[in-house]
Amino acid sequence: GAVVSQHPSWVICKSGTSVKIECRSLDFQATTMFWYRQFPKQSLMLMATSNEGSKATYEQGVEKDKFLINHASLTLSTLTVTSAHPEDSSFYICSARPPGTSGDGIPYEQYFGPGTRLTVT
Amino acid sequence: GQNIDQPTEMTATEGAIVQINCTYQTSGFNGLFWYQQHAGEAPTFLSYNVLDGLEEKGRFSSFLSRSKGYSYLLLKELQMKDSASYLCAALDSNYQLIWGAGTKLIIKP
């Protein structure tokens, strides 16, 4: 159980175009989803937290107009990178968190998707 | 401010034991997670500690001292596949995960 999928797993796009990444919780309802970015050889950087049905909360320094997040349902969140530039090339990872305690008895456990590698040319 | 410290890189020999330390300073504390991340992949859950003491799970064990703001991950009988980054993350009073920068573990034959 507790599987999170991401689509696409990798994408190459041209500078100036927009790219949408989907994150789905397949076998549980996720009241909260998180979007991370990771540059090579660096740790995870939290970009934003999204709760179903409400606006996402962005971390300091993350442009909300550039990285549009929509948490439309309890199983789906999307991240759209608008007007992408080469510096947006990165590994984007989502995670989903069910309410309360996980099946393993762990509070607020996050389940990670496999990640999406974005390359902007 | 909130801060997690762990070594940037460690090297160990196949078959040996390695201990990866993590110190944390957070606003409140609701537990500490360890994740493993292979290059190009998402993190996978290893352990969660909220009470003081050692939790053993096969070749991996995790220790927590809340009074010292300290945790370690112990890996025994190292295998080449254990080469990865190990991420320490603390859950603060708002149940937000505060991430460390990760420790890259290199296993040599």
Image (tube, coloured by chain):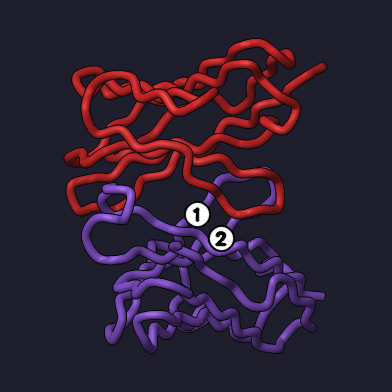
Chain colours: A purple, B red
As measured in the structure, the alpha-carbon distance from the residue carrying label 1 to the one carrying label 2 is: 5 Å
Instruction: Tell me the kind of residue under disc 2.
Output: Arg
* Mark earlier in primary sequence (1, 2): 2
Give the residue type that dot 1 points to: Met
Residue B12 locus on image (x, y percent): 69, 15
> Could you confirm whether marks 1 and 2 are on the same chain?
yes
The residue that mark 1 highlights is A45
> How many marks can you see?
2
User: Mark 1 touching mark 2, by CB under 8 A?
Assistant: yes
Mark 2 residue crowding within 10 angstroms, few (<14) / some (14–19) / many (20+): many
Dot 1 crowding, Cα within 10 Å, few <14, some 14–19, many 20+:
some
Camera-side residue of A119 and B65: B65
Whether residue A57 is visible: no
* B108 w.r.t. A100: above or below: above
Identity of the residue drawn at 35% across and 25% down? B55
Check the picture and name the quadrant holding the C terminus of chain A: bottom right
In the depicted structure, whether residue A14 falls above or below residue B19: below
In the image, residue B27 lies at what x, y percent? 20, 41
Query: Of the numbered discs in the image, which one, if any, rests on residue B30?
Result: none
Where in the figure is residue A14, as x and y percent of width and height? 79, 83
Element type at mark 2: strand
Q: Residue at x 59, y 54 (%)?
A: B42
What residue sits 44% from the left and 82% below the top? Answer: A76
| Residue where numbered disc 2 is placed | A37
Q: Using the image, name the chain to which the residue with label 1 belongs.
A: A
For disc 2, the chain is A
* Element under disc 1: strand
Q: Quadrant of residue A19?
A: bottom right
Picture residue at 51% right of the left edge, 78% below the top:
A67
Q: Quadrant of residue A20?
A: bottom right
